[in-house]
Amino acid sequence: MAKKIEVTKLMITERDVSVFVDDNSALKDKHIQPEGRMLADSDHLAFIYILDVEEDFIYVSFPETVWSHLNIALNKNLPLFLYTDDDIRIPLLQFQEELLYFISNIAENSNYGKKMVDAVSHVFSIEM
């Protein structure tokens, strides 16, 4: 079963977004390959980014508490980088595209549940 770590903080600059997690011990000194794929976790109101870490998967959970920052990142088209250590960061490839897909798919789609639909439509407003 994949290990899940939760994003606790996003720091937005003019050039990118730094992503920090609650426990990065599973990422330290490991070979990490960003999968470029995401999942929606409607039970926990979160978006999940998948990492391939030495033949295992780690799910990086973006809970509703950081969605307002994700909305800013989307609107500014900023790349996201996950910090695995003080000076090592991993690009979250395809993050923008995957998140935009889920936002558009979840909008008014009862398959994700009313709470998820309401939360996504309340937080995300994509300026095209």
Image (cartoon, rainbow, N blue to C red):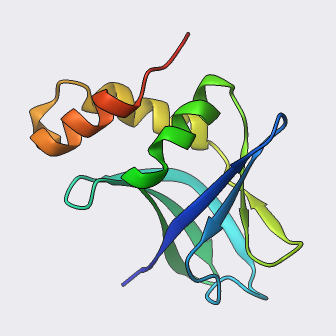
User: Which quadrant is home to the C terminus?
Assistant: top right
* Percent x, y of residue 27: 67, 82
Q: Residue at x 52, y 33 (%)?
A: 71
Q: Nearer the viewer, residue 67 or 89?
A: 67
Q: How many marks?
A: 0
Q: Where's the N terminus, which quadrant?
A: bottom left
Write down the quadrant of residue 69 in the picture.
top right
Taking the view exactly as shown, the residue that stands out farthest to the right is 87
Q: Position of residue 9 (x, y in %)?
A: 60, 60
Residue drawn at x 89%, y 72% as measured from the top left: 87
The structure residue drawn at horizontal position 26% and vertical position 33%, both measured from the top left corner, is: 106
Quarter holding residue 115: top left
Q: Residue furthest top?
A: 128
Image point 74% across, 86% down: which residue? 28
Relative to residue 53, is residue 90 drawn left or right?
A: right
**Residue 51's spot in the image, x, y percent?**
58, 67
Q: In the rendered view, would you say 70 is above or below 8?
A: above
Horizontal placement of 37 versus 91: left or right?
Answer: left
Query: Where is residue 45 drawn, in percent x and y?
Result: 28, 53
* 55 relative to 69, above or below: below
